[in-house]
Image (cartoon, rainbow, N blue to C red):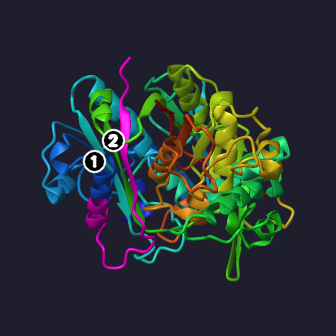
Amino acid sequence: MSRACIVGAFEHPTRKAEGISVAQLHMQSARGALADAGLTFDDVDGYFCAGDAPGLGPMSMLEYMNLNVSHFDSTDSGGSAYLVHVAHAAQAIATGKCNVALITLAGRPRAAGMKSAKMPLAPTPDTPFEAPHAASIVEMYGMVAARHMHEFGTTSEQLAWIKVAASHHAQHNENAMLRNVVTVEDVVNSPIVSAPLHRLDCCVVSDGGGALVVTSEAVAKSLSRPLVAVRGSGEAIRHPSAGRIDLTTSAAAVSGPRAFSEAGVTPADIKYASIYDSFTITVLVALEDLGFCEKGKGGAFVADGNLISGIGRLPFNTDGGGLCNNHPSNRGGMTKVIEAVRQLRGEAHPAVQVADCDLALAHGTGGSLATRHGSATLILERQ
Amino acid sequence: MNIADIAEVQFDAASFWEAAKTHRLLVARCNACGEAHYYPRQICPFCRADDVELAPASGRGTIYSLSVTERPDHRRVVAYVTLEEGPTMMTRIIDAPQDIAIGDAVTVDFEASPDGLTVPVFRRT
């Protein structure tokens, strides 16, 4: 079967975009990904963006970039949207709606003065029931962590290992916001933001952007880049189910099995995993739901460096992830795909490159794990 | 647009907010299927019937999860509380002692939010 391939990937190097507009960041990222692929703007006939793009859907950005496309999609599931876009681009290419799909993300919350992620106030039916109570995203994820600890005995030290692993990787990334290697003690001794989450359990606030180019296998083979095929994908939305809440399971429990089933592989086959890391608990819950370990055993799984490249069984977020490297526009899904592509091409930093990395997983969690969120999982393969 | 403005046009829950003004907590229950739900809708989210009724809750529940945020000028305890009637709702625990924990029994109280909405909160029983 012919599979869509990711042929272009670009992470904007900036982490503080003073004097650069959001639209400009999107287009700079697009230009970078197209150059990476060996393609031009004239080749693009499909465009994908989410709520971080200025304007209503793709219209403003298509005008800004002066593009005309035959297919567009502005599916928004928060930070996981860009993994959904890859899956939707593959579907659109398979059905002939477009041939070269461009996906962009960008934002500048840091330059705009944002110090922590506030809950957006939207005119939705849930807002009056939540906004008077939860003031920040950290409180929401704090409730997830507290419940996980209560049910399964997960500890702050175990969660800290996730940050420790990310920091080991970030030391090799010259663009990473936080390059210092930290210890479990550093994490658990950092100030508590919203219990039980510490400052070092939280991702960075950074500016920047990223872009991907997805095309058919036929076009991909005409280019000079390694072939990174989309072998499987899954997407799911989970919400409080009208008051029947289970905070310890995420939508990854649906998106993961769908992606694995489509790819015909199992978690044991995965050589590298990009796991969305808005907070350490986000990674822990996703690893369990994706099937890398049993539900409730995530703490033991991540401990003792098991996520560190070259040391552990499942190297993760070798760019430093959102915890240390980059979380542009408070949406970390794009950079998850980009680092997975680097690993599959053998283009990750040599200190963190996984040997013979031919099968990788990228996973995104968007929205709030404590309320409504969208998960998307991709299984990517080097052909 | 503040939270009270948003609540005003979520017509499904108008009686919930009216009752809250006089410190009464209502829970939505469907007369067709018997299931209680939260937040209140006029169409049952389980059987999709139009027969939802908001009735007084006992006001008692237990903490399902919580997160404490301490700052020099304030202390906030966000929580999910599971009501005796079944549904779990997001709320806050007020006057929470230091050892407040998951599983603690709590009782409803009410607080005026800064923009004029009276919202249900809980305190340890």
What kind of element bears circle 1?
loop
Q: Quadrant of residue A190?
A: bottom right
What kind of element bears circle 2?
loop
In the rendered image, residue B58, in percent from the top left (x then y), is placed at 71, 43
Mark 2 — on which chain does it sit? A
- Residue under the point 44% across and 41% down: A83
- Residue under the point 42% across and 66% down: A13
Q: Which mark is residue A224?
A: 2
- Residue under the point 73% across and 39% down: B84
Q: Quadrant of residue A286?
A: top right
- Residue under the point 46% across and 49% down: A338
Residue under circle 1? A38
Q: Is residue A250 visible?
A: yes
In the picture as drawn, the residue positioned furthest to the front comes out as A224
The question of residue A26 being in magenta is answered with: yes
Mark 2: few/some/many CA within 10 Å (<14, 14-19, 20+): few
In the picture as drawn, the residue positioned furthest to the bottom comes out as B72
* Real-space Cα separation, disc 1 to disc 2, in angstroms: 7 Å
Q: Is residue B5 visible?
A: no
Q: Which amino acid, mark 2?
A: Ser
Q: Which residues are magenta?
A: A1-28
In the rendered image, residue A370, in percent from the top left (x then y), is placed at 61, 48
**Camera-nearest residue between B123 and A98:** A98
Q: Which amino acid, mark 1?
A: Gly
The question of residue B46 being in magenta is answered with: no
In the picture as drawn, the residue positioned furthest to the top comes out as A1
**Camera-nearest residue between A380 and A73:** A380
Q: Do residues under tags 1 and 2 come within 8 Å of each other at their CB atoms?
A: yes
- First reached walking from the N terminus: tag 1 or tag 2: 1
In the rendered image, residue B46, in percent from the top left (x then y), is placed at 53, 25
- A53 on left or right of B120: left
